[in-house]
Amino acid sequence: MKTEIIPAGEIQGALKVLQSGGIVAFPTDTVYGLGSLAFDNDAIESIYKAKDRPLEKAIPILIADVRDLETVADSIPDMAKTLASRFWPGPLTCIVPKKHTLPLAVSATSTIGVRIPNHPAARALLRVTGAMAVTSANISGQPSPSTAQEVFDQLNGRIPLILDGGKTPGGIPSTLVDCTGSTPVILRAGPISLAELLAAL
């Protein structure tokens, strides 16, 4: 497979790849992500293959706007709505009940992680594609890439397309918080602290 790098503004090129069942790397506010359309089971499975990612690890969902949350989540907890209104777009992934129509490849459990990235290129792409299943664009266990070249260095020959939006501003993955209980539980530390979450609630 030949891996092509094009400017992040060339969304139609990315859309063509995604709609034909392919996967695309693109910049977010944290690191470069590797994604497919959220409801394309085969494409999601190819993310695992490209990354050598363990199959038991769920893949988060990225959306463009808060209203899109209802397309991928059911019975959305008030905690998630409150945290989303405070921290989205931004580096916070909320674990919420998964919509039953999402493919098994996204998550084998009843929950899913969702966030809105604070990056113009990512949101422009998501507004055209709808929800996407997205994880960091690296080989599992290797450093998360913050440039298109770093993605290419790891995934050349494994993915068809990289959107080059320059260096990502964040550099570290989002805070992952479980919103399905009575209090927020941080599952992965990130830019947003537990104290900030509790203050927002």
Image (cartoon, rainbow, N blue to C red):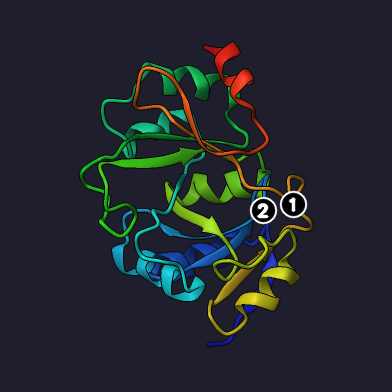
Q: Residue 87: name its quadrant.
A: top right
Q: Find residue 127 and name its label.
A: none
Please state the horizontal and vertical placement of residue 99, each as a whole percent of the image: 26, 40
Query: Residue 179 appears at what percent x and percent y?
Result: 40, 27
The secondary element bearing badge 1 is classed as loop
Instruction: Name which residue lies at 70% across and 77% down.
Output: 153
Label 1 neighbour load within 10 Å: few <14, some 14-19, many 20+: many
Q: Earlier in the sequence, mark 2 or mark 1?
A: 2
Q: Position of residue 157 (x, y in %)?
A: 57, 85
Q: Residue at x 51, y 11 (%)?
A: 201
Q: Are circles 2 and 1 on residues that touch, CB within 8 Å?
A: yes
The residue located at (58%, 86%) in the rendering is: 2
Q: Could you tell me residue 73's position as x and y percent?
A: 32, 35
Placement of 107 over or under 140, stated as above or below: above
Q: Amino acid at mark 2?
A: Val
The answer to which of 121 and 49 lies nearer the viewer is 49
| Residue annotated with mark 1 | 168
Q: Reply above or below: 199 against 42.
A: above
Note whether 27 is above or below 162 in the view shown: above
Measure the alpha-carbon separation of dots 2 and 1: 6 Å
Q: Secondary structure at mark 2?
A: loop
- Marks counted in the figure total 2
162 horizontally vs 72: left or right: right
Q: Amino acid at mark 1?
A: Thr
Residue annotated with mark 2: 31
